[in-house]
Image (cartoon, rainbow, N blue to C red):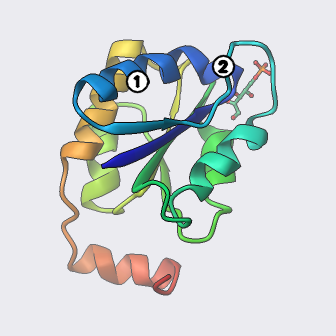
Amino acid sequence: MRIAIGSDHAGFHLKQHLIAHLTAAGYEVIDCGTDSDASCDYPDFIRPTAEMVPAGQADVAIVLGGSGNGEAIVANKVHGIRCAVCWNEESGRLAKQHNNANCIAIGERMVTLELGAQIVDAWLGATFEGGRHQRRIDKIEPAV
Ligand SMILES: O=C(CO)[C@H](O)[C@H](O)COP(=O)(O)O
């Protein structure tokens, strides 16, 4: 599985932690920047990260910032992206089970690095339940 990952300055350290974590677990990780914790504007990095998925260059995306809120807002502007803000393992798991999210947003200022990795693992390890959840997703956006 190919995972695109991007952040602004406030999510940079979590991005580096997750790249190491996911690479060690055998995932192909595509680092979309930013490259340091110098202040930058999150749309400049988050939009290109999310666009990797509908472009077929990544299977899923992870977007990171201080809160994750602005990052999710940007990612959800990309057609075909369903990005969920996640803050604990359960929200990560449900992002896949109920929302079939192909992108998650995490705020580095909201979680420890270790919890960030646990959230990602919970999301990647879960299975979409379909059924009533697919019906609801179909009401959000027709098939892309
Ligand atoms: O979480 C974010 C957007 O939702 C940003 O990471 C956050 O707003 C950056 O803040 P600052 O420029 O004060 O470091």
- Residue beneath the point at 47% across and 47% down: 61
Numbered circle sitting on residue 81:
none
Question: How far from the left and from the top, in percent, is residue 144?
Answer: 50, 82
Q: In this view of the protein, which residue sits in the foreground, 67 or 19?
A: 19
Distance, label 2 to label 1, CA atoms, is 14 Å
Instruction: Please tell me which of labels 2 and 1 falls first in the chain.
Output: 2
Name the residue tied to disc 2. Answer: 10
- Ligand 1 has an atom within 8 Å of the beta carbon of the residue at disc 1: no
Q: Residue at x 19, y 44 (%)?
A: 125
Residue 3 sits in which quadrant?
top left
Identify the amino acid type marked 2: Ala
Question: What type is the residue that disc 1 sits on?
Answer: Leu
Task: Please say whether residue 76 is visible from this viewpoint.
Answer: yes
Using the rendered view, name the quadrant where residue 122 is placed.
top left
Q: Are marks 2 and 1 in contact (CB under 8 Å)?
A: no
- Packing grade of label 2 (10 A; few <14, some 14-19, many >=20) is many
- Could you tell me residue 112's position as x and y percent? 41, 13
Using a 10 Å C-alpha cutoff, classify the residue at mark 1 as few (fewer than 14 neighbours), some (14 to 19) or many (20 or more): many
Residue linked to disc 1: 18
